[in-house]
Amino acid sequence: IRTMQSLEKRRSLSIKEILLYSEMLYSQRRYKDSFNILKKYMKKAKEEDTEFWQILGDLAWIYRDYPTAIRGAKSLYKTKKARIVDYERLYLFYLNENRAKLAM
């Protein structure tokens, strides 16, 4: 983890490095740190970075960061890599959003 931190200070991490860093943090039960490192590099990830969006979406859902979770699910949907859980999240999010609009 120290190596990744020093590497990050010197240059921008690649997606593979970001995933490795996040995985190391996660394995040490530093779940929030794992989520934050992924979220920090969201703009760098391409829609084709399936593993990135899956992990980010899962952690975002756990931390109730629904806009981030939906961003991950949308990327997976667009690339036809969405899992059942991603479809469920999209459905629940938009169902809730429509209910809020109807209540106004």
Image: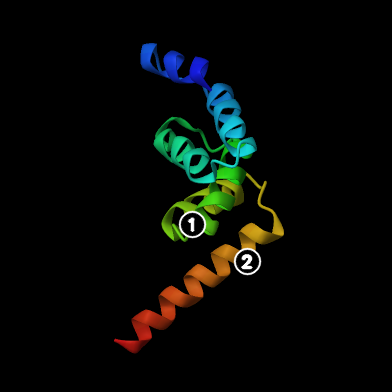
Residue 94: assigned label: none
Decide which of 88, 47 is in the foreground and name it.
88
- Whole-angstrom CA distance, mark 1 to mark 2, is 17 Å
Q: Is label 1 or label 2 in front?
A: 1
Decide which of 85, 47 is in the foreground and name it.
85
Say if 89 sits above or below 39 in the image.
below
User: Going by the picture, which residue comes out furthest to the bottom?
Assistant: 103
Residue 1 percent across, percent down from the top left: 53, 23
| Mark positioned earlier in the residue sequence (1 or 2) | 1
Decide which of 74, 3 is in the foreground and name it.
3
Say if 11 sits above or below 36 in the image.
above
Q: Which residue is mark 1?
A: 63
Residue 39 percent across, percent down from the top left: 44, 40
Residue 92 percent across, percent down from the top left: 54, 71
Cβ–Cβ below 8 Å for labels 1 and 2? no
Say if 13 sits above or below 56 in the image.
above
Locate residue 89 relative to residue 99 in the image: left or right: right
Q: Which residue is mark 2?
A: 88
For mark 2, give the secondary structure.
Answer: helix
User: Going by the picture, which residue comes out furthest to the right?
Assistant: 84
> Callout 2 environment at 10 Å: few (<14), some (14 to 19), or many (20+)?
few
Q: How many marks?
A: 2
Q: Mark 2 is on which residue type?
A: Glu
For mark 1, give the secondary structure.
Answer: loop
Q: Quadrant of residue 86?
A: bottom right
> Callout 1 environment at 10 Å: few (<14), some (14 to 19), or many (20+)?
some
Q: Residue at x 66, y 47 (%)?
A: 80
